[in-house]
Image (cartoon, rainbow, N blue to C red):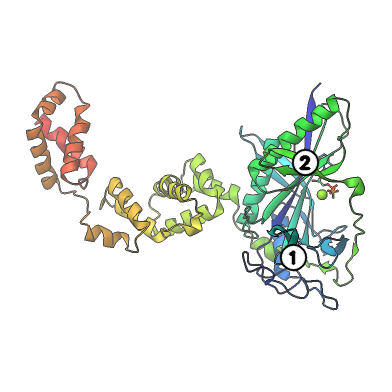
């Protein structure tokens, strides 16, 4: 019997507002425990939440980018449950009337095919605090810095059919929120995580099977692994005549397995009801139109512009645009050097990204400013230095504050393009290596590379290689 997998993802995106969704406390990561907290986040009685306008703007931005409907009126609800890291005893979320409804995202799979995934809704809510179990012996510590941090929860339709599709969808939502600058998407810090709802059904069956919900997955690889494990587990159970229990499970990356957390039967009844402290959120058309006009250029549009206007190779254009920050670095470099966009592309994809991978850093921590990369590339373009010397300077720029032009001057690196002086070096080399010269004349053209190498060596790499090539041939044939 063959089985079909059905998946729906709930992605939690931390919005990068300066302050929390209902209080003025800071959202900065890594502060001392329990310092980013206000009376509102601590659940003190008698204090009132005030909705953060920036969080609302960000949710609208997201909704517009996925062609969703922005609710002109939405409602905040209390989701009641008791947990030590939730001092109020309820989480403020949106339930019946979320701010974003409907919409879709087109995902691209490894084999190049595309597929549209429906998005049911996206709603605003607050995050809970954090329980720390390994700080004190036999006691749990609570850090409420994260309590009240704004989240956008994006719920997909059960349109996803494989682990690969799920990972691709998650990656594209990640890319989108970074492009929109509504989240830093930092997965290590928990700013981007997802719950995967997974079920299987016999191929051809119309109804969905019973699902399990795998909670709190914070990497693209883990989402694939967790789904693959879950699909195998469910198929095995069904084939052995067992039922699937609707339950919440946890993925353990060390063991590469999912384990039950709690089953839905004994789960809380959240008793959602509208929060009496918060007015319904009303958004006028003017605000929506204003945000629409400010939407940035997104991935697909960027790739088209790079390939059509800048004549970048399609695969390279996608590589650059894949990461919005890299694309910004690329464009900032072009602002200072626009003669040869493909040259800029090549350098970023090989040299710059090479350094990022080697040092395991993001582009915003990269040592070389776009202006410096631009000036390095213009010195290649105007034949002041060779590519080889440019690579050498590139490495020096990683640790130096000097400018490219200062370095070229101080180290005397200007390329030799004067025909007369190159010819002198060529004559010397041909004199010393007359055997190779004869071999070349006898038809063994490979020795040319060796002779060019000798001239380059004598000029410490400074001679223009193309001229060296030509002048050697000229002299040999004379
Ligand atoms: P809940 O709020 O209880 O988690 P929802 O109905 O909001 O339930 O669904 C949450 C997610 O589960 C959505 O992404 C939805 O697409 C997905 N989903 C619902 N039913 C199934 C199913 N049978 N198999 C896989 N995913 C499902
Ligand atoms: Mg859920």
Res. 352 visible in picture: yes
Q: What residue is drawn where x is 22% and y is 61%?
A: 410
Q: Earlier in the sequence, mark 2 or mark 1?
A: 1
Quarter of the image with the C terminus is: top left
Res. 308 visible in picture: no
185 horizontally vs 60: left or right: left
Instruction: Mark 2 and mark 1 in contact? Answer it, CB < 8 Å.
Output: no
Residue under circle 1?
147
Residue toward you, 167 or 115: 167
Q: Is residue 73 above or below residue 311?
A: below
Residue 177: x, y in percent? 65, 55
Determine which of the numbered discs, if any, sits on residue 260 in the image: none
In the picture as drawn, the residue positioned furthest to the bottom comes out as: 46
Residue toward you, 440 or 45: 45
Q: Is residue 107 above or below residue 272?
A: above
Residue under circle 2?
259
354 horizontally vs 127: left or right: left
For marks 2 and 1, give the CA distance: 27 Å
Disc 1 secondary structure class: loop
Residue 174: x, y in percent? 64, 50
């Amino acid at each position: 019997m063959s089985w079909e997998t059905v998946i729906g993802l709930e992605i939690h995106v931390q919005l990068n507002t300066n302050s929390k969704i209902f209080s003025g406390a800071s959202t900065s990561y890594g502060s001392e425990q329990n310092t980013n907290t206000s009376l509102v986040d601590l659940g003190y009685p008698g204090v009132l939440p005030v909705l953060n306008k920036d969080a609302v703007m960000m949710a609208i931005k997201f909704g517009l980018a996925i062609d969703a409907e922005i609710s002109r009126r939405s409602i905040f609800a209390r989701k009641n449950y008791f947990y030590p890291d939730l001092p109020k005893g309820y989480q403020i979320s949106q339930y019946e009337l979320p701010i974003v409804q409907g919409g879709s995202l087109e995902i691209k799979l490894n084999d190049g095919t595309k597929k549209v995934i429906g998005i049911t809704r996206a709603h605003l809510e607050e995050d809970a605090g954090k329980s720390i179990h390994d700080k004190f012996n036999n006691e749990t510590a609570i850090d409420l810095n994260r309590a009240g941090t704004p989240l956008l929860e994006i719920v997909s339709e059960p349109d996803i059919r494989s682990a690969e599709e799920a990972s691709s969808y998650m990656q594209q939502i990640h890319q989108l929120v970074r492009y929109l600058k509504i989240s830093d998407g930092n997965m290590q810090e928990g700013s981007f995580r997802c719950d995967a709802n997974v079920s299987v059904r016999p191929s051809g069956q119309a109804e969905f099977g019973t699902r399990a919900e795998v909670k709190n997955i914070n990497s693209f690889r883990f989402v694939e692994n967790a789904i693959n494990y879950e699909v195998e587990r469910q198929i095995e159970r069904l084939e052995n005549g067992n039922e699937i229990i609707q339950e919440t499970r946890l993925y353990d990356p060390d063991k590469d397995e999912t384990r039950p957390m709690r089953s839905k039967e004994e789960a809380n009844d959240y008793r959602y009801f509208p929060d009496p402290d918060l007015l319904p959120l009303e958004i006028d058309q003017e605000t929506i139109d204003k945000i629409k006009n400010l939407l940035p250029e997104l991935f697909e549009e960027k790739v088209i512009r790079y390939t059509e206007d800048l004549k970048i190779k399609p695969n390279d254009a996608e590589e650059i645009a894949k990461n919005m920050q890299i694309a910004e670095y690329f464009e900032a470099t072009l602002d200072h050097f626009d003669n040869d966009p493909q040259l800029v592309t090549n350098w970023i994809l090989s040299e710059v990204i090479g350094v990022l991978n080697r040092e395991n850093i993001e582009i915003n921590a990269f040592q070389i400013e776009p202006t410096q990369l631009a000036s390095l590339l213009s010195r290649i373009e105007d034949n002041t230095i060779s590519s080889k010397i440019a690579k050498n300077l590139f490495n020096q720029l990683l640790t130096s504050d000097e400018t490219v032009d200062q370095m070229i001057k101080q180290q005397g690196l200007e390329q030799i393009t004067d025909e007369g002086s190159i010819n002198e070096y060529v004559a010397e080399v041909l004199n010393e290596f007359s055997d190779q010269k004869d071999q070349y004349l006898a038809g063994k053209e490979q020795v040319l590379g060796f002779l060019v190498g000798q001239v380059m060596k004598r000029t410490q790499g400074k001679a223009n290689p193309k001229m060296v090539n030509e002048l050697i041939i000229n002299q040999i044939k004379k």
